[in-house]
């Protein structure tokens, strides 16, 4: 699904991160920077159709338990960049649009 920010949870996490290029933002409902990051992710997803964008709602009980066990989160939002199931970059905090675009271009060689 290109151009949208998908809901990521324990049930679809593995398949989502196996994409050629995937960006997952982890956040919680009470986090103001997470809320401010949502429109940045949505706008950026519209620009890069070859990259899958997802958001994991870490505050929803039972939805991200396996994800929490797999990764350590000290800051929300945290953004992971995956290529074919391999975590290639972790960035903590809200990324500004230009920084997010630059990282996508740097780590994913053929986005459109």
Image: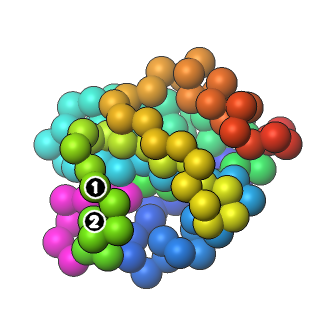
- Can you tell which of label 1 and label 2 is closer to the viewer? 1
Residue tagged by mark 2?
68
Query: Where is residue 71 drawn, in percent x and y?
Result: 34, 60
Q: Is residue 20 left or right of residue 69?
A: right
Which of the two residues, 86 or 25, is positioned nearer the viewer here?
86
Q: Tell me the SS state at disc 2.
A: helix
The residue stretch that appears in magenta: 56-62
Q: Quadrant of residue 44?
A: top right
Query: Where is residue 53 drawn, in percent x and y?
Result: 57, 51
Q: Is residue 61 magenta?
A: yes
Q: Is residue 86 magenta?
A: no
Q: Is residue 75 left or right of residue 88?
A: left
Which of the two residues, 11 or 81, is positioned nearer the viewer here?
81
Name the outermost residue toward the bottom.
11
- Residue 39 in sight in this render: no
Q: Is residue 111 left or right of residue 84?
A: right
Residue tagged by mark 1?
72
């Amino acid at each position: 699904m290109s151009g949208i920010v998908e809901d990521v949870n324990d049930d679809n996490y593995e398949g989502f991160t196996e994409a050629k290029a995937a960006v997952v933002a982890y956040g919680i409902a009470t986090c103001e920077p997470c809320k401010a990051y949502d429109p940045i992710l949505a706008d950026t997803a519209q620009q890069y159709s070859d990259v899958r964008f997802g958001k994991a709602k870490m505050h929803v009980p039972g939805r991200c338990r396996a994800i929490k066990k797999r990764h350590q989160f000290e800051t929300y939002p945290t953004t992971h960049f995956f290529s074919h199931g391999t975590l290639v970059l972790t960035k903590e905090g809200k990324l500004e649009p230009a920084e997010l675009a630059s990282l996508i271009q740097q780590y994913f060689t053929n986005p459109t």
